[in-house]
Image (cartoon, helix red, strand yellow):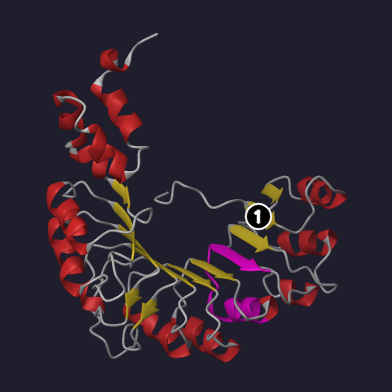
Amino acid sequence: MATLVELPDSVLLEIFSYLPVRDRIRISRVCHRWKRLVDDRWLWRHVDLTLYTMRPKVMWHLLRRYMASRLHSLRMGGYLFSGSQAPQLSPALLRALGQKCPNLKRLCLHVADLSMVPITSLPSTLRTLELHSCEISMAWLHKQQDPTVLPLLECIVLDRVPAFRDEHLQGLTRFRALRSLVLGGTYRVTETGLDAGLQELSYLQRLEVLGCTLSADSTLLAISRHLRHVRKIRLTVRGLSAPGLAVLEGMPALESLCLQGPLVTPEMPSPTEILSSCLTMPKLRVLELQGLGWEGQEAEKILCKGLPHCMVIVRACPKESMDWWM
């Protein structure tokens, strides 16, 4: 069996890529070879800083010392401070991130107060922006903002962003490259606002509405009206009925449909009713049912047998993947 000393650089780099950032820096002190490998730009393609509470100056050090043109994905929290009065994510830091890392494509921000950070500070190269439990300024997503901001943005995830509301949804039309939208726990978005917003976002190819106060029936009705060419839909089944699901019948481009529990009501469509609706979708290739408690039951057999051209996935709600950059 080969020892660590005998392993080639490519294998050691792969092993080191699974280490948290702090441990990567520590192992650079082992020997000159490991220091050289830790300095390799390949090792810093995907960086997760949410595991730590760090001072802003530490973040600046990481940015200047390790993050460079190879960085593609960055995940960090808004708690980059050691005391409650210390600054969090600053416009200067985010601007420097865009200048130092010109190939940054995905930015995930967690528990960040962005209320004093203008959206123009974000790196212009972003294709995916994820906001999890973040505070944003009311002006962030208004239509009146500069339409040239984030010109390459294709996907935006808004998960438990309390300030997000109807007018913000309509303001997303400023991102002309946007094709994927995920709304999670955005309780200020109303059924009327969703309908009006999707009318202006008719070019979306993927939509997820999870854990919101909106009923599944009203969400599907808005989708059927305005997103005729949507390819992927994922939503929680709260308020879902057979007539509500039937509005998707004949959707010409729908390839993937995921219905996610666990709020199953008596109005929930039966497996036979789900099968009937899915058979009218000519391009459907993936049907996923999560957290409905149908695993290994007759419902799964009915769907698998009735949809031989589809990949039918019936399972409990999966744990969040650690490979967050995928």
Can you say whether 78 is above or below 305 in the image?
A: below
Query: Could you tell me which residue is drawn at 74 percent across and 72 percent down?
Result: 246
Query: Could you tell me which residue is drawn at 75 percent across and 65 percent down?
Result: 277
Magenta region, residue range: 218-236
Q: Which of 250 and 130 is in front in this view?
A: 130
Q: Which of 265 and 309 is in front in this view?
A: 265
Asked if residue 31 lies in the magenta stretch, the reply is no
Where disc 1 sits, the SS reads loop
Can you say whether 66 is above or below 17 in the image?
A: below
Residue 258: tell me if it is visible. yes
Residue 76 position in % (x across, y down): 33, 59
| Furthest residue toward top | 1
Amino acid bearing label 1: Cys
Position of residue 275 in the picture relative to residue 59 (left or right): right
Asked if residue 232 lies in the magenta stretch, the reply is yes
Where does label 1 land, which residue?
A: 317
Q: Which of 65 and 237 is in front in this view?
A: 65
Residue 268 position in % (x across, y down): 80, 70
